[in-house]
Image (cartoon, coloured by chain):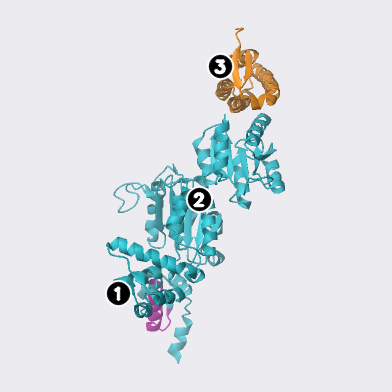
Amino acid sequence: MPRQGGNRHSILVVDDDRDILLLLKKWLEGGDFNVVTAESAEDALMEIAASKPNLVITDLFMGGMSGLDLLARIHEDDPLLPVIMLSGQARIPDAVKATHLGSAAFLTKPVQKAEVLEHVERALRINHDRSGEQAIQKNVIYRSRIMEELVDLALLVADSNVTVFISGATGTGKEVIARAIHDASPRRDKPFIAVNCGAIPEQLLESELFGHEKGAFTGAASRNEGLFQAANGGTIFLDEIGDMPLTLQVKLLRVLQDFEVRPVGSTRSYPIDVRVISATHQDIDAAVRDGEFREDLYYRLKVVPMHMPTLAERREDIPLLVTHFLGAYAQKNSKPVKRFAPEAMEYLTAASWPGNIRQLMNVVDLCVTLSKTETIPLSLVKKVLQDKPGDFITLKEAKQEFEKNYLIGVLRVTNGHVANAAKIAGRNRTEFYKLLSQHGIDPAGFRQARST
Amino acid sequence: MSDKIEVIVDSDLEDLIPGFLENRMQDLEKLQQAAKRGDFGTLQSIGHSLKGVGGGYGFDRMSKIGEGIENAGRTSDLEAANGRVAELADYLSRLNIVFE
């Protein structure tokens, strides 16, 4: 979006007070911007469709549709269009809500010229400080086109508060990109809290996320503010969101709608200002179709969807990543940096990498540890890769595999008699049937086995 | 009460000021009528917009008076509203604008 010649940035100003419109128009035109105006949110929506502005500045309270509703409508169609809110009142709940809906700034009237121009330039990323870009470059190692596009998107979303949803296979670096977005955002000095929703038992996850009062349940010996409140002002990264139980999905949706959390056992809610980034390796579209993931929550989470490519889709990054891991290993262990023989590096670049970057890192670490020489030979790389450290399945997959084998075992013992099998498993019949259906096991198959 | 109140306004805004002041005179008239009727909603709403618009143009005191009218409207305080509306009338009548 260059500013030269006829390519000046265009700004839509929305206010039902004509004197404010004239004032802002004057200031912004003086700052070399093209300005269009609208006296209502309804007119603004038509103007956006017609003139495609680069930025919107809107009043909060107007007759008819409010500025917040306008902000929400704008971001339904274009989550990356920056919107600056103007309000006659510095009311914190409005500011928090505007922040959550992704406003670029929240200014209180009367506004001053310098303040408006500064926020406009920041929102349009003109003369912006490059610290955000540097933060991402430092954390994300790449030279591939596919990653360049992803990093551009990450930089674009970093400045705003829009909710980001990261999909991609295990080990592709979803948390790395989430952290990079946080580090490049104005929230960088506040906490970044990562939660693996699949690793915390269902009963604990609610109190871990939203907190609990003392005595809220057995074992709640003291009050816990929860991770959402701990991340206040910063970013919470909800990894493996697809593993979140449905009951908790409802509660998370409420938090995202109301921007407040209510700890377990508490009668009051606490306002929160937290940016949410979520991620999963699962096919959430399929989970939504199967009724395992709430569609309304999914839409709220994936305002900006990002997809992490597999390592095989960005092979040109492998040598860079390998060099990075070699350096990191040496630094961590205070050892001299080793290197791969050229043919070993070629082999690494061409390998299949089902476990993606995490597997690559493990292989590099293992090769460095096992290599007796400073240059790691091809033979060692081949040996390490044949041992297939990346073929380890996740704990969740291992548990599922065990569960399936267990169910098959009890059905075999009971000759497909579901009531008896459920009794052995310590589950009621309904639950047991549910488990069987989750694993695609048909008990009738075991009854037939008995008759033959 | 005849002393002029000097307000320094950005010369870029010079062409906007006549229209701006005309609108404020209309606001004043509406406020006086609203105060007479005891129409606190109108007092609050016009006070709010005065507060929002005054300071941007350089009329900081206008924003302060607007805030007072808004508060008087919100708390249904007729005495305060009358006092603040009279203050606005006095302020507008004594303005001496200097463009810089």
| Label 3 residue SS | helix
Residue density around tag 2, few if under 14, some if 14–19, many if 20 or more, within 10 Å = many
The shade of chain A is cyan
Q: Chain of mark 2?
A: A
Q: Position of residue A81 (x, y in %)?
A: 60, 48
Q: Residues within 10 Å of mark 1 (few under 14, many from 20)?
A: some
- Residue at image coords 65%, 26%: B13
Q: Residue A105 at what x, y percent from top left?
A: 54, 40
Evaluate whether label 2 is on the same chain as label 3.
no
Q: SS class of the residue under badge 1?
A: loop
**Can the viewer see residue A303 in this picture?**
yes
Does label 3 lie on the same chain as label 1?
no
Q: Residue at 35% x, 75% y: name it.
A: A424
Amino acid carrying mark 3 in the image: Ala
Using the image, name the chain to which the residue with label 1 belongs.
A
Residue sitting nearer the eye, A241 or A114: A114
Which chain does the residue under circle 3 lie in?
B
Q: Is residue B44 above or below residue A203?
A: above
What type is the residue that disc 2 sits on? Answer: Ala
Indicate whether residue A411 is drawn in magenta.
Answer: yes
Which color has been applied to chain B in this rendered view? Answer: orange
Report which residue position mark 2 lands on: A158
The residue under label 3 is B80
Quadrant position of the C terminus of chain A in the picture: bottom left
Query: What residue range appears in magenta?
Result: A399-417
Numbered label attached to residue A371 = 1
* Alpha-carbon span between mark 1 and mark 2: 41 Å
